[in-house]
Image (spheres, rainbow, N blue to C red):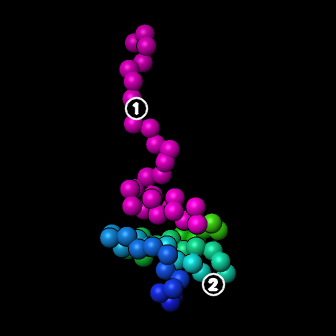
């Protein structure tokens, strides 16, 4: 793929590239790739590759009442 098709590349080696049909290919640093139809979805996938999980993700744990 030409460099002009590259949208972003992270320090970890993950990237988003535009394909010829207008979709987006998101690859992690080990060349595991997924295809999406929108840039927004591609950014979400990239975030999942970089952090290891997708949002929404809750870290606000509370003790259950009455236990």
Q: Position of residue 20 (x, y in %)?
A: 63, 84
Disc with the residue nearer the chain's start (1 vs 2) = 2
Residue 44: say if magenta: yes
**Which residue shows up at 54% across the image and 74% down it?**
25
Q: Residue at x 39, y 29 (%)?
A: 61
Q: Are marks 1 and 2 in contact (CB under 8 Å)?
A: no
Which residue is tagged 2? Answer: 20
Residue 7 percent coordinates (x, y): 49, 75
Q: How many badges with numbers are in the image? A: 2
Q: Is 59 included in the stretch rendered in magenta?
A: yes
Q: Which residues are magenta?
A: 39-67
Instruction: Say what secondary structure mark 1 lies in.
Output: loop
Q: Which residue is mark 1?
A: 60
- Secondary element under disc 2, as helix, strand or loop, is loop
Query: In the depicted view, which residue is nearer to us: 23 or 34?
Result: 23
Residue at the image point whose x is 63% and y is 66% from the top: 38
């Amino acid at each position: 793929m030409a460099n002009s098709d590259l949208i972003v590349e992270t320090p970890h080696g993950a990237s988003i590239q535009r394909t010829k049909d207008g979709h987006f290919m998101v690859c992690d640093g080990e060349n595991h790739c997924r295809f999406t139809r929108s840039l927004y979805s591609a950014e979400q996938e990239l975030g999942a590759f970089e952090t290891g999980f997708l949002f929404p993700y809750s870290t606000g744990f509370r003790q259950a009442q009455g236990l």
